[in-house]
Image (cartoon, rainbow, N blue to C red):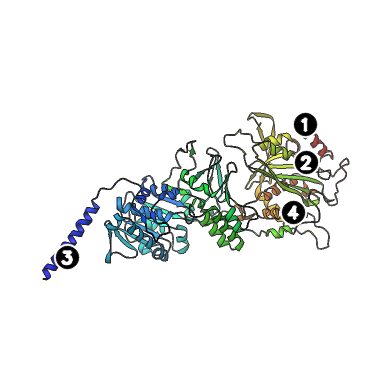
Amino acid sequence: MGRLLDHKASSEKRVRLYDLAAILWEPTEKTTPDKWGADNRVYPPTSGKPGQRDPLLTPYIVPYARGFDDNRYTRNVLVTGAQSGKTETILDVIGYRCDTRPVPILYVGPSREFLTDQFEPRLMGLFDEAPKLKRKLARGKRMKKTLKRVAGVTVRLAHAGSSTALKSDPAGLALVDEYDEMLSNIKGQGDPLGLVEARGITYADFMTGITSTPSQGMVETEMDHESGLEFWGVVAPEDVTSPIWRLWQEGTRHHWTWRCPHCREWFVPRFKCLSWPKTATPAQARREAFIECPRNGCVIEEVHKEAMNAEGIYVAPGQTVNVDGSVLGDPPDTTTLSFWVSGLASPFVSFGERAETYLKALASGETDKVQTAVNAGFGEVYTPGGGDVPEWQEVAKLKAPYLPRTLPDQALFLTAGIDVQKNRLPFVIRAWGARATSWLIDSGDLWGDTSQQEVWDDLADLITQPIDGLQIRLVFVDSGFRPGKKFAVPEHRVYSFARRFPRFVFPTKGRRTQTRPIIQSKIEVKADGKTSKYGLTLHLLDTDHWKSWVHERLRYPHIREDGEASLGAWYLHGETADDYCQQIVSEARTTSPTGAPVWVQRSRENHYLDCEALAAAAGYQLNAHRISPGSRRKDDDKTEPKISVPDANGAPKAEAESKFDRIARLAAGFNGL
């Protein structure tokens, strides 16, 4: 009887082995991870989105999944926000490889709890959803929580805190998930990526996939004038604490790019493209948030997202986009394939929800919540603010009892700072007195397309209109932003405007740091692109110096201990808006690990701070800091205090005649007004 039972068991075992062999010998169709997922995965009715798997719901992750078949690369890096669909794509890759080209797979999560409570149940769901994998999965005693056998190979789950698991078996494919969170969990134990990649030495086509939301760093954008796209710039590794971001910038640096549904220009969506009403509550922002096209200011709403994602493409620095949407040129030469996509592209979270989460985090006053909103919400690194920057309510206390567009008796001359945006010209007019004491006289926005003439005519009216009989003495206009398209004429509107008022309007460009606060440079190009006989003088400004100068004045005492007014104080008129005060403290100064000064944006609007920095530089150029106490302005037809002003070439004279303002008005008249 025992022999019969043993024979029967042996026969059943042979049958199972034959069945498994038959499954393994089934011919496999050539496919891709995303197509495999669509053909083989069906979500159960109990899931949040039952039915057939649709990878094109998140088309921005499809190129990442297909990158595992590109043998030019040894690493495949994806940086994105939360709720972007990356885990489902990782499951597609695992299923695709187990079914079509089985190799041992090592999946590394950030913690043991993440593996057992979150990922392992979803992995088992994959094996149950896909009929092909369900037949190939070895169940019973050989299946453990962190070790599965599929098609004769292992799928091992490990976490960074267990070096034993990371050193256990060779692997043909490694997948590292939530890399930044992983390194924060293993403080002091080193980088597990080296251990992971050591598992693949025996496999010629071994590749490591690394995904994560980023953490902290000091990263800025840079404009690619060939493509017209704004890419993330590469920074020194020591300036970025986010491990995934450092890996990403070592690679091809592909950016997910949308096409505006209105102007049809391509752009890279990111946090600063998200707009909502200035004074909106979180709930109002949820209802009214939209994307502002950075190319032409078009309003893009949530309803446009699906179509933009469907048409979206990845573009790397050095590549351009053709009219039909095809990408031309090769990406950077590297063995790391890297992708970045904004959390704004997620179909699972609306623009409004992202804005609401961010505003709630700001309102909480907790830095950790703000960082989470930026990292998880937008897939961007968070730069913690530094320095002792006052709150805007403290700035509002600098108001003095005088009205806008009226001059205090001590004011001697006026300067203006003009910022240039695509759809407006923010401006500040400031009066100056003894030892650089200054008063805000006017501020606001001149609205209009800055690539067109009309708004510049409005600016001409503004700066030539006397205030209490006093003309503006010097105007600095930021020329760092170029209106119009990338194929517009080289000379932009700022230079053309400066030529209309060559004695008191000068273009500027900001630099992070330089040897002097102001450096003058000649521009020898006319509006038509030809060489000019009389060039413009461009003023290069040390932005760190001038923004710091403004912030230093915010806590400058108005009254001395003896009760007299302080020299060098910085005043606001009595009707200064809260928005102005908020923008003045919209940036904070900090330093990078290399010691370089970095200005961190704390809120979205910072234009008045830029304008005040320009107006301050103009005041310095006029030697406002050298005006002696007791100086008073007199009637317009009498002699004024002798103030240094730039001549036609931009060089300061030792002294200026009192008739400078009248000459400036005459010059303006001869130049087209």
Q: How many marks?
A: 4
Which amino acid, mark 2? Val
Q: Earlier in the sequence, mark 1 or mark 4?
A: 4
Query: Could you tell me residue 151's position as x and y percent?
Result: 27, 56
How far separated are the C-alphas under marks 1 and 4? Answer: 35 Å
Q: Which residue is mark 1?
A: 670
Mark 4 or mark 3: which is in front?
3
- Left or right, 270 with respect to 632, comes to left
**Residue 384 occupies which quadrant of the picture?**
bottom right
Q: Which residue is mark 2?
A: 645
Above or below residue 14? Residue 449 is: above
In what element is the residue under mark 1?
helix
In what element is the residue under mark 2?
loop
Q: Earlier in the sequence, mark 4 or mark 3?
A: 3
Taking the spot 59% from the left edge, 60% from the top edge, the residue there is 360
In what element is the residue under mark 3?
helix
